[in-house]
């Protein structure tokens, strides 16, 4: 039997005819959603169609040379860069957010100063970070083009992001949790690490993932700091190019456009995998706590 | 015997004077109710008994507050004070973890690690809070999956888990339905055998039903304090009578 509250197509249409503006709005929002989806779909399929035919095993050989244009060193460098940047910026960002939310009083002047600084930092174009990294880490400190210089530059870049998202995540933990914990005689440290942080993990993780995305996709800040050597570095003081830089270099040289497209496919797959993994990890972590 | 002794307690939130010259004795193994209109300072007084006011910026307290003759605001370790003086809040606030971990959090905080002991404590606390039968088969489930009334009894169990002397309750039933409320009232009446209970309530019938002594507060002053029977049948103060008979508040 038909539900008496079922709204049929005809009912909807009649409503829109009666109220044309509502119908107009409906068309607009549907169109907007469709266009967004179409653009994304086109972008992804374009990259895949252009890149997949040029994927071959030679692109994944350990050693890079002009014959195979291997991206394997770049993939490994990308992983190293992500890990280094997160080791540097992760604890710093998370701990400073903990200070701002849990320790600093609401009238604290430092909060304002830090907030203005982080907001300014996050608005600076990445090439400026690259320039700073080159002038300071590469030249002034004499590190040369190195993974370390690149990682430090990137970590300054992602620090505000990690800090802000952690701050938001901590602030969204209800005060009643903190009160409950204090009322049981738990100290500040135990309250923060056992009650507040676990509840904030999904939010913090979201910030970390956004940061990974920025590191993986960054070129401008890395070109002048980590350099463009397409080999696996022997130490963090060696130069090395990440996947995005590799792709930029290939496309820029104009000799290996096809390989650049293939690299694009790999980059896309990596980013999608990171997103999927992080969502999965967040779910598992939250479940583990419950 | 007096559990709490309060002498000339005054409390400011920055420039606002929230408590004016409150002196009272709170008897052990009794239920003491604080009543009065919103903003009269009764919750504030309750929170100064386990120093939860310390968390509020700009809060300043003068006078003397003693627990068993010891100065609460003196050398006493604040975490040990809160272990002795447990608290249940207005809104149920279980932690987002399993029922078991919610109860075990307190004992673990105070250094109990043995699984065997923890199991015992969890069972006893849940039984004391009359929620064992509903919770025993789902100890590993999230505490947030319980109903509001069950969550509040879980919070009472959590407060009992560290074996306090005193239980402070800040309007513990105001967010609950009548059935859950009556369960918690029965529970509180049961608890006074082992614990001293101080309860803030907006519900006058509740204060009549369960409390031994009642304090009536108005604009930061303790207007009247005495046996609940007397307060609710023949209050001495006109303001107290007006409030109890519902003429204002």
Image: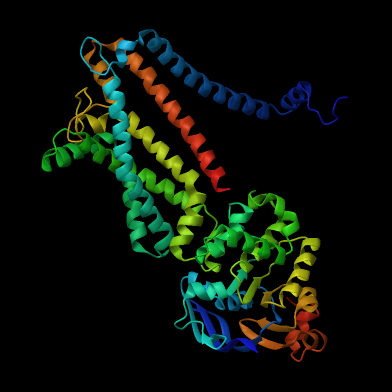
Residue B181 in the figure: left or right of residue A163: right
**Percent position (x, y) of residue B38?**
66, 73
Quadrant that contains the N terminus of chain A: top right
Q: Which residue is drawn at 46% across and 83% down?
A: B74
User: How many marks overall?
Assistant: 0
Q: Nearer the viewer, residue A66 or B1?
A: B1
Q: Is residue B91 visible?
A: no
Q: In this view, does A68 lie above or below B216?
A: above
Q: On screen, A56 above or below B87? A: above
Q: Position of residue B221 (x, y in %)?
A: 62, 85
Which residue: 51% across, 52% down?
A172
Q: Residue furthest right?
A: A1
Nearer to the camera, B70 or A29: B70
Front one among B130 and A20: B130
Res. B230 image quadrant? bottom right
Left or right, residue B167 beside residue A90? right
Q: In which quarter of the image is residue B197?
A: bottom right
The answer to whether residue A114 of the structure is visible from this angle is yes
Q: In this view, does B236 lie above or below A219?
A: below
| Residue B73 horizontal side relative to residue A137, left or right | right
Q: Where is residue B99 in the image (x, y as percent from the top left)?
A: 63, 54
């Amino acid at each position: 039997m038909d539900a008496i509250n079922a709204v049929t197509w005809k009912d909807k249409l009649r409503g829109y005819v009666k109220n044309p503006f509502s119908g107009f709005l409906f068309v607009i929002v549907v169109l907007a959603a469709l266009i967004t989806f179409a653009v994304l779909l086109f972008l992804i399929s374009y990259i895949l169609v252009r890149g997949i035919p040029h994927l071959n095993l030679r692109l994944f050989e350990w050693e890079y040379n002009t014959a195979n244009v291997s991206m394997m060193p770049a993939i490994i460098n990308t992983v190293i860069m992500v890990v280094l940047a997160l080791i540097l910026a992760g604890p710093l960002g998370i701990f400073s957010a903990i200070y701002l939310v849990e320790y600093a009083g609401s009238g604290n002047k430092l909060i304002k100063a830090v907030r203005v600084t982080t907001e300014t930092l996050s608005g600076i174009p990445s090439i400026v970070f690259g320039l700073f990294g080159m002038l300071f880490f590469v030249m002034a400190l004499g590190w040369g083009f190195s993974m370390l210089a690149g990682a430090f530059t990137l970590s300054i870049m992602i620090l505000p992001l990690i800090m802000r998202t952690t701050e938001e995540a901590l602030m969204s933990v209800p005060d009643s949790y903190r009160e409950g914990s204090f009322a049981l005689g738990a100290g500040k440290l135990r309250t923060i690490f056992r009650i507040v942080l676990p509840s904030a993990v999904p939010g913090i993780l979201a910030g970390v993932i956004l940061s990974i995305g920025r590191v993986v996709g960054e070129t401008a800040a890395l070109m002048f700091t980590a350099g463009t050597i397409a080999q696996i570095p022997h130490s963090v003081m060696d130069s090395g190019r990440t996947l995005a830089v590799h792709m930029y270099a290939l496309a820029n040289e104009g000799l290996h456009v096809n390989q650049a497209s293939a690299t694009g496919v790999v980059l896309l797959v990596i980013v999608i995998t990171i997103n999927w993994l992080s969502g999965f990890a967040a779910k598992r972590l939250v479940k583990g706590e419950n | 015997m007096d559990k709490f002794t309060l002498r000339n307690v005054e409390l400011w939130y920055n420039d606002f004077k929230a408590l004016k010259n409150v002196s009272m004795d709170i008897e052990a193994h009794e239920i003491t109710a604080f009543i009065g209109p919103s903003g009269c300072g009764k919750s504030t007084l309750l929170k100064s008994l386990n120093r939860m006011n310390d968390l509020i910026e700009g809060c300043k307290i003068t006078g003397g507050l003693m627990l068993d003759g010891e100065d609460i605001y003196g050398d006493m370790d604040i975490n040990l004070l809160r272990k002795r003086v447990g608290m249940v809040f207005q809104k149920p606030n279980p932690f987002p973890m399993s029922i078991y971990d919610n109860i075990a959090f307190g004992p673990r905080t105070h250094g109990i690690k043995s699984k065997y002991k923890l199991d015992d404590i969890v069972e006893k606390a849940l039984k004391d809070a009359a929620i064992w039968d509903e919770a025993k088969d789902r100890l590993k489930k999230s505490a947030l999956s319980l109903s509001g009334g069950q969550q509040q009894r879980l919070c009472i169990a959590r407060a009992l888990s560290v074996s306090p002397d005193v239980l402070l309750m800040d309007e513990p039933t105001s967010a609950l339905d009548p059935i859950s409320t009556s369960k918690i009232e029965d529970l509180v009446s049961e608890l006074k055998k082992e614990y001293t209970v101080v309860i803030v309530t907006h519900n006058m019938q509740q204060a009549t039903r369960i409390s031994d002594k009642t304090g009536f507060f108005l604009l930061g002053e303790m207007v009247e304090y005495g046996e609940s029977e007397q307060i609710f049948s023949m209050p001495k103060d006109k303001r107290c009578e007006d409030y109890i008979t519902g003429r204002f508040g």
